[in-house]
Image: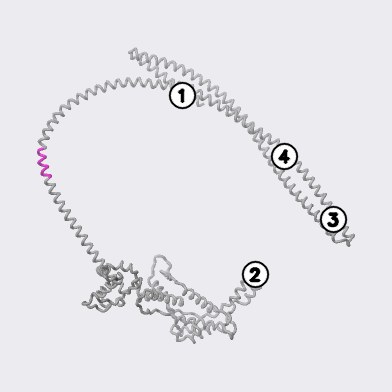
């Protein structure tokens, strides 16, 4: 932590100084906290805590007590080291870090720093039968091996301790960080209770102070904490020196707007706060220049640098200018509003005067109009009285006409109603033969469907019977396969017996003559191998034949099952056909009865239709020639009765059709 804090301080100061030199401004050295004495106390050769600990680890017979005594002897009196009577009695010591005092207990320092692997464990791993475990043991032993001492007259090899390994890693880390451009992110803990929406200011301040952020901010504020690009500075503060910028733009001498703006602002800042720089002579006020470094402003190549006090004064000047401009804008806006209100009042007063004059003129015109309109009203009243009388006569006339036309219309409606009813009767009468034909077509379609289904069922039954006959061929093939298997089995047994005989003969020949040549032995062996191959081949053929026979048996069984199912299905279809034929005969019987009923209903309907036609002719004769109302009413009653009976018969015919 101390090393990284030192690197952080150096990096922050270096960035500040590099930017000042790159911009070419005047600057002086900035003091910052240095913790090099703490780093020397920790790991400097000779008296550093880590070096003392390494020496204690290398020396024989050392303990934590000897390490503590050695530290007290060598480091007492150092400014960053503390060891009072209480700490010495408890074998403790304190170090003043950049974050504050930290106490350390020396118990276990020596043992933890050695971090040696027991020799027995290494030997146990090396004696393992697993190659991976052996390789792992070699890596552990090589990493734990002591480093060779440097120089020709160097003594024995020094063992690497935890402190030395850590120091080496830290040096490599700092070397890598120095080669890069790091960016620092400080993580702060908002509270110690680990609860949301709770901010502990004291804890945050303590963390900022311990992390060195407060010191970094102080170093930054000692220099030039505020900086702007030239364009940003001119855009932000050009309102403070508009006259000077306009004068410089019109002048013959060309100057940067930034320089003109900074000079003008510096003079105004000195006028506001004379303690920033020496006072300006009023006589030579226009030509004199202010020392910008005393004011706290520096103009670089691309940026303008401001100290904190100068930035505060500039911001106050900008706020004051904005406030003044705001007041002026408000005054102009209020004046404009008042002027607009005054003009509106003037226009409204003129409009009121015009309206008053218009009202007076209208009153004069109204009196003249009343006289003229009185005459018109009299004329209108007289015309209204005459029109009222005319309308009364007209209404009476129209009432009489309405009564007459109503009587004529009702008579015409009666005739049309009779015609409509007659058309309805004709429609139902003409629809009877068509409905009868439709019913016959439905019956014939049902009969045709039953015949077609019977034909399809018979064809399906025939196919199932053919398939059942084919099962006999399958059984014959199965018997042939069994015979072939038996023949193959006999051939295999013969081959086995022949092979055994040949082997016995070969053994006898070998026992009788041991002096036979090697070539004959090789030939017998080759013959024996060939016989073995033939035997294996026959065995494989036998296995394949057995498998094919098993498959054929399985197929025969499946075909037999299918034949049984087909027979059952054919029997079920025969039963269904018998039931359907019985149902068809019953349907034909019912159809014959329904047909008889329909014929009876049709004969009655025809008789009624003839009666209706006769009544219609009588009604037509009476309506054309006769004027006897009683007879006409009687015929009309008979016609209604005939129509009612016709409707009942139609309903009976519909019921029969549904059946």
Please state the total of marks drawn on the protein image. Answer: 4
Instruction: Name the residue beneath numbered marker 3.
Output: 503
Instruction: Name the residue beneath numbered marker 1.
Output: 651
The span from disc 2 to disc 3 (Cα, nearest Å) is: 51 Å
Instruction: Name the residue beneath numbered marker 2.
Output: 131
Q: Is residue 164 left or right of residue 309?
A: right
Main SS of the magenta part reads: helix
Q: Which of marks 4 and 2 is nearer the N terminus?
A: 2
Question: Disc 2 on helix, strand or loop?
Answer: helix
Question: Disc 1 on helix, strand or loop?
Answer: helix
Question: Disc 3 on helix, strand or loop?
Answer: helix
Q: In this view, does 541 lie above or below 4?
A: above
Q: Position of residue 313 (x, y in %)?
A: 28, 72
Q: Are marks 4 and 2 in contact (CB under 8 Å)?
A: no
Which numbered disc, 1 or 3, marks the residue closer to the eye?
A: 3
Instruction: Name the residue beneath numbered marker 4.
Output: 474
Q: In this view, does 383 lie to the left or right of 509?
A: left
The span from disc 4 to disc 2 (Cα, nearest Å) is: 65 Å
Q: Does the magenta stretch include residue 305?
A: no
| Foreground pick, 286 / 434 | 286
Which numbered disc, 3 or 4, marks the residue closer to the eye?
A: 3
Q: Earlier in the sequence, mark 2 or mark 3?
A: 2
Q: Position of residue 545 (x, y in %)?
A: 74, 47
């Amino acid at each position: 932590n101390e090393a990284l804090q030192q690197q952080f301080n150096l990096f922050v100061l270096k960035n500040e100084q590099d930017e000042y030199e790159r911009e070419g401004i005047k600057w002086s050295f900035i003091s910052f906290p240095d913790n090099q004495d703490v780093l020397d106390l920790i790991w400097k050769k000779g008296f550093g805590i880590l070096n003392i600990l390494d020496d204690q680890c290398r020396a024989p017979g050392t303990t934590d007590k000897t390490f503590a005594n050695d530290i007290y002897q060598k480091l007492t009196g150092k400014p960053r080291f503390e060891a009072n009577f209480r700490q010495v009695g408890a074998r403790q010591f304190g170090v003043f870090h950049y974050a504050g005092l930290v106490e350390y207990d020396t118990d276990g320092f020596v043992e933890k720093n050695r971090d040696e692997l027991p020799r027995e464990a290494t030997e146990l791993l090396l004696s393992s039968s697993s190659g991976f475990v052996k390789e792992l043991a070699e890596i552990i032993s090589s990493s734990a091996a002591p480093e060779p001492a440097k120089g020709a007259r160097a003594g024995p090899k020094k063992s690497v301790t935890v402190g030395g390994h850590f120091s080496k890693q830290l040096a490599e880390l700092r070397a890598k960080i120095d080669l890069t451009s790091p960016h620092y992110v400080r993580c702060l803990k908002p509270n110690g209770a680990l609860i949301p929406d709770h901010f502990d200011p004291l804890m945050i301040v303590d963390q900022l102070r311990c992390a060195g952020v407060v010191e970094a901010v102080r170093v930054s504020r000692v220099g030039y904490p505020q900086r702007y690009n030239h364009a940003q500075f001119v855009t932000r503060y050009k309102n403070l020196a508009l006259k000077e910028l306009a004068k410089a733009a019109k002048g013959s001498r060309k100057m940067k707007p930034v320089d003109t703006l900074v000079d003008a602002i510096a003079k105004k800042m000195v006028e506001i706060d004379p303690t920033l720089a020496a006072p300006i002579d009023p006589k030579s006020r226009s030509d004199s220049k202010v020392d910008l470094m005393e004011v706290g402003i520096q103009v670089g190549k691309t940026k303008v640098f401001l100290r904190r006090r100068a930035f505060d004064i500039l911001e106050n000047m900008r706020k004051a200018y904005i406030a003044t401009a705001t007041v002026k804008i408000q005054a102009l806006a209020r004046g404009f509003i008042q002027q607009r209100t005054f003009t509106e009042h003037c226009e409204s007063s003129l409009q009121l005067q015009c309206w008053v004059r218009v009202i007076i003129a209208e009153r004069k015109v109204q009196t003249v109009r009343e006289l003229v309109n009185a005459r018109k009203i009299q004329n209108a009243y007289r015309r209204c009285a005459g029109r009222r009388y005319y309308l009364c006569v007209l209404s009476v006339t129209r009432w009489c006409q309405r009564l007459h036309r109503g009587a004529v219309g009702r008579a015409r409606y009666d005739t049309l109603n009779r015609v409509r009813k007659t058309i309805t009767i004709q429609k139902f009468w003409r629809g009877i033969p068509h409905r009868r034909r439709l019913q016959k077509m439905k019956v014939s379609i049902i009969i045709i469907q039953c015949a077609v289904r019977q034909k399809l069922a018979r064809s399906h039954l025939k196919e199932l019977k053919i398939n059942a006959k084919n099962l006999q061929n399958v059984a014959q093939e199965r018997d042939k396969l069994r015979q072939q298997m038996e023949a193959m089995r006999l051939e295999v047994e013969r081959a086995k017996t022949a092979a055994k005989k040949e082997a016995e003969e070969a053994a006898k020949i070998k026992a009788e003559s041991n002096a036979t040549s090697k070539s004959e032995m090789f030939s017998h062996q080759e013959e024996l191998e060939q016989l073995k191959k033939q035997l294996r081949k026959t065995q494989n053929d036998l296995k394949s034949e057995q498998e094919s026979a098993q498959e054929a048996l399985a197929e025969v069984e499946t075909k037999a099952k299918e034949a049984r199912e087909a027979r059952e299905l054919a029997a079920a279809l025969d039963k269904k056909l018998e039931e359907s034929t019985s149902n068809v005969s019953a349907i034909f019987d019912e159809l014959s009865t329904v047909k008889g009923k329909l014929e009876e209903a049709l004969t009655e309907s025809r008789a009624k239709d003839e009666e209706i036609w006769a009544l219609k002719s009588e009604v037509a004769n009476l309506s054309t020639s006769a004027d006897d109302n009683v007879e006409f009413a009687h015929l009309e009653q008979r016609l209604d009765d005939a129509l009612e009976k016709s409707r009942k018969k139609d309903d009976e015919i519909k019921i029969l059709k549904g059946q």
